[in-house]
Image (spheres, rainbow, N blue to C red):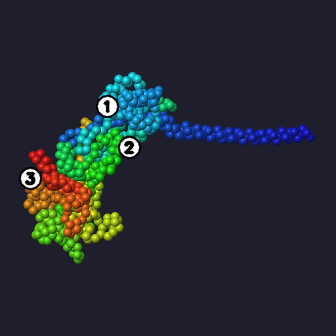
Amino acid sequence: MRKTNLLCKIFVKFSLFKKRLILICMMMMFLFCFLVINLYYLQVISCRKYTLLSNKNRIKFIPIEPIRGIIYDCHGVPLVLNKIVYHLEIVPDKIKNLNETICLLRCIVHLTDNDIANFEKEKKNIQYSFLSIPIKKNLTDSQKASFLVNQHRFPGVFIKSCSIRYYPYGELLSHILGYVSNIKNNQIKYKSYGIEDMVQMYSYANNFAKSGIEFFYNDVLCGMPGYKVIEVNNKGKIIRKLHERFPISGRDITLTIDISLQKYIQNLLANDFRSCAVVADPNTGEIRALVSHPSYDPNLFVNGISKSNFFLLLQNKDAPLINRVTQGVYSPASTIKPYILFSALTLQIIKQDFLMFDPGWWKLPQSHKYYHDWKKSGHGLFNVITALGESVDILFYQLAYNMGIDLLSQWMMKFGYGKITGIDLLEENIGVMPTKDWKRKKFKKSWYMGDTILVGIGRGYWTATPIQMLKSLMILINNGNIVTPHLCYSINIKNKNKILYEKLNNEKIGDFFSQYYDIVKYGMYFSANCDKGTDYKDFYNSTYKSAVKSGATQLYSLKNSENYDVRKISEYLQDHKLMVSFAPFDNPIVASVVVLENSNTHVTVGEITRKILDYVMLRSH
């Protein structure tokens, strides 16, 4: 009986053991299968992924900066250069006692606390100790000589040459060229990328041109970076160099700018605190000079401008960072009268044999509102040509009333107002070509006929940039053919032909052979060459014939009994003076726009325009 019970117990235990063994075997089989599947996933399916990750840990790409292209004026004068400077750099991996080395270098190359602070800041961002970090930038000749004599004492410290942008003309061309800011290479090259990723990242980070031609044509000027491919161990030390590709230099650019004319205009405007001028060939749209005053020195930004200097520029009331030609907005005033008159003639709102009497005021129909002419006594009897030549306001009050704001704004947009001009600078303001919808969205108010009347003389809500004024003038000169103002003449490619600026095909305004263009242009001729013209005194004795239209932008309204007295008005509330012009009248080769902000100097806008035209016309003959 006992033996039977014992056998039963043994059988139960064996059965339990068998079940456990089967369970353990199944678990082992499951784990083995899981291991095989996971191994297959890692070694086969994810092979490419983990190979790339491994290579990124093992293989590093170090970009090599290309030489940036040079920018020339139309006569081949270099406007911007690449200057070689020398930096003192340290490879932390090769320094036994970094603090001691820095202390010794302090006396030799005159390290400042700021130099050391910048070095420590960049050192924190570095991933690999085999890369060098600058500790002293822009070494002088004496500092270079002092270090070279002692170089044997400093393994891991060396002098490295770098190419930086240099603007030899400083403030003269800053609003044309723009500037290139300090690039922090360490933020790029200390990271891990594939070749394509590295080039894209470098190109993005190397897009450090901030404005002007430098920014607009950055892809052309910056070239293609090269790179070194190196292998490192798990401690970040270099084992070997695997491959190297040399960088491709950027292309050179030739501008339409004439540096001698640029200098001349800059000197003319030097007495006016805030002013600008732009001069172009109206047949091609090539800009010969673009001056915005005051300006700034772009060389301040090349190595990184200090906060104090940058805040001085930002807080300057004269706004030197603003390109007044493309970003400055002004009421165009009487300079737009030629385009309004042409529009009215084309639409048959006024006939070319029109006659009208000016008593010195114009009354808005069905109201008691009077609008006064700039000449209080009136101009008497006038026609369409003398209306432009003498700048008769009441005619344009009437034309604005007859056309209405919708038709008026529609035609002025055809002449380029309220739109970008297409100039090859990204810093461009579109100004305001007001409409009923614009006022409703902007001020939540309805449009009134009085608003339209002010737009008729280029005031009220209407604002425009000088480059828009230039484009509209060139459209008029070319009888409706749209010419885009531009600064680039050609992109130069080594061993190949130049790529010239491609003129865009644009629609035309009106009939090229329309006699109305001639009527309007002759009205501008009257202004400069007939004794009753508003600008006769500045142009009557020139050896060539020019056509001009001046304007004055009032920044506040005078009462009926109040006279304009510059001595009683704040500087920033004084009138802006504007003038558009072209010469010679029969076959124009030059068009210009000049704006003097808050002008109270003894030199008038007409005198400056005359000197600019004289310089171009008399020098070209």
User: Which picture quadrant has residue 73?
Assistant: top left
Residue under label 2, please give it.
204
Where residue 522 sits: x, y (%)?
12, 60
Camera-side mark, 2 or 3: 3
Q: Amino acid at mark 1?
A: Thr
In primary-sequence order, the first of circles 2 and 3 is: 2
Which of the labelled discs sits on residue 542, or is there none? 3
Q: CA distance from mark 3 to mark 1?
A: 53 Å
Left or right of 174? Residue 20 is: right
In primary-sequence order, the first of circles 1 and 2 is: 1
Camera-side mark, 3 or 1: 1
Task: Look at 29% across and 43% down and name the residue there.
Answer: 298
Q: Is residue 202 above or below residue 576?
A: above
Which of the labelled discs sits on residue 140, or is there none? 1
Where residue 525 sits: x, y (%)?
11, 58
Q: Nearer the viewer, residue 135 or 166?
A: 135
Left or right of 194? Residue 479 is: left
Task: Look at 22% across and 68% down and name the residue there.
Answer: 559
